[in-house]
Image (cartoon, grey):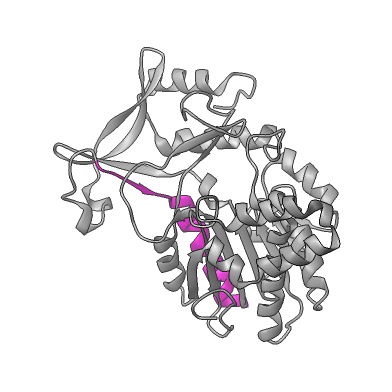
Amino acid sequence: MQDQNLPLAEMFRRLIRNTGPISVTQFMGESNARYYAAKDPLGGAGDFITAPEISQMFGELIGLWLADMWISAGREDPVYYVELGPGRGTLAKDALRAARKYGFEPRVHFVETSPALKDVQLKSLPGAIWHDDLSTIPQDGPIMLVGNEFLDALPIRQLVRGEDGWRERMVGLDDDRFVFVAGGQNMDPAVPVDWRDAPEGTILETCPAAAAIMYEVAGRLNDQGGAALFIDYGYDAVKGGSTLQAIQNHQKVDPFANPGGADLTAHVDFSTLARIAQSRDVRHIGTVTQGEWLSALGIASRAENLAKRAPHYGAEIAAARDRLIAPDQMGTLFKVMGLASDNWPGGVGFPAG
């Protein structure tokens, strides 16, 4: 499936007609690869807005958290700031500006595969070094890693409980329409024991790509030292049901409506990812809601100080604060997971902090 000029929907239809249904993993993975390669999806003129674009406070507080962890661990040098899927570079720019006041001036490394976004990031942080994956990140010092709304775009796998057991959920065709269908292979061994007798129609999601990245990040933290923050919408206990959704022009749309032209995402299973990190002797210092975490780091005081310096923007600053922390906005749905190497301290905002 290499012809970038052919609409992805038509490529999928040809493939399904020739070889049979494709997995949800393939549908989501190829759709997002096409989507992110072609455009900058962020901002009012794009399809969605992430927390760093809502307010500088978000990135600044992350930068202060990273600086505090690094200082508490002994100010080891060299130290590397690593961001997975850095968007426009806004988070990194705000975080590093705030952290610089405390002597934290790491070497900056971005893991990014989108040519369109690399061009934007280059303007924000021209001194950064880009990587296609984590394998080429330096290994001679601790890493301070951030992944904000990165994991949710990785392709998920869905399993559905049928009359005679579990099957992988696939994408097939009804005439020209994409529809969900059940695969032919029994998938019971891939289902947790306590879910195997779930009612017919139950759906479970896993994300092999997120699991692989978490395994590698944890290995890096174990070998090199450091800490990591993963911020995304998701849940902290395994749940049933499909969370696959598509966003286009700031609205939810049918995931099948425009493959390659809309952002496909799914909720992150933080509980499973925490167990993977712990399997490599990395400390899970906590998973809390974004609202709790930002509040513990002092977002209210930061908003107040910004409003005092620019009173004509006071209402906008308050609205941005509320959007980030209010339970009915991003405050509860979004979670913050903190990890640290075994000999590093707990972090502010987490129970172990």
Who is closer to the viewer here, 300 or 117? 300
Residue 107 location, x and y as percent? 78, 67
**Residue 275 vertical placement versus 13 (above, below):** below
Look at the image and tell me whether residue 352 can be seen.
yes
Closer to the camera, 241 or 18? Answer: 241
Q: Is residue 57 above or below residue 174?
A: below
Q: Is residue 237 magenta?
A: no
Frontmost residue, 280 versus 64: 64
Place of residue 266 in the rendered image (x, y in percent of width and height, measured from the top left): 46, 44
For the point 55% across and 52% down, the residue is 330
7 w.r.t. 250: above or below = above
166 sits to left or right of 12 = left
The residue lying toward the viewer, choosing from 94 and 182, is: 94
Name the residue furthest top: 175
Horizontal side of residue 181 vs 40, given as left or right: left
Determine the main secondary structure of the stretch shown in magenta: helix
Please report the residue visible at 44 percent of the width from the left and 73 percent of the height from the top: 278
Percent coordinates x, y for residue 174 in the rendering: 34, 16
Q: How many marks?
A: 0
Quadrant occupied by the N terminus: top right
Residue at 70% across / 76% down in the picture? 141
Relative to residue 37, is residue 302 depicted above or below?
below
Q: Which residues are magenta?
A: 202-224
Q: Is residue 277 left or right of residue 100?
A: left
Quadrant of the image occupied by residue 99: bottom right
| Residue found at x 50% / y 56% | 327
Magenta stretch holds residue 213: yes
x%, y% of residue 71?
71, 83
Residue 86 visible? no
Quadrant occupied by the C terminus = bottom right
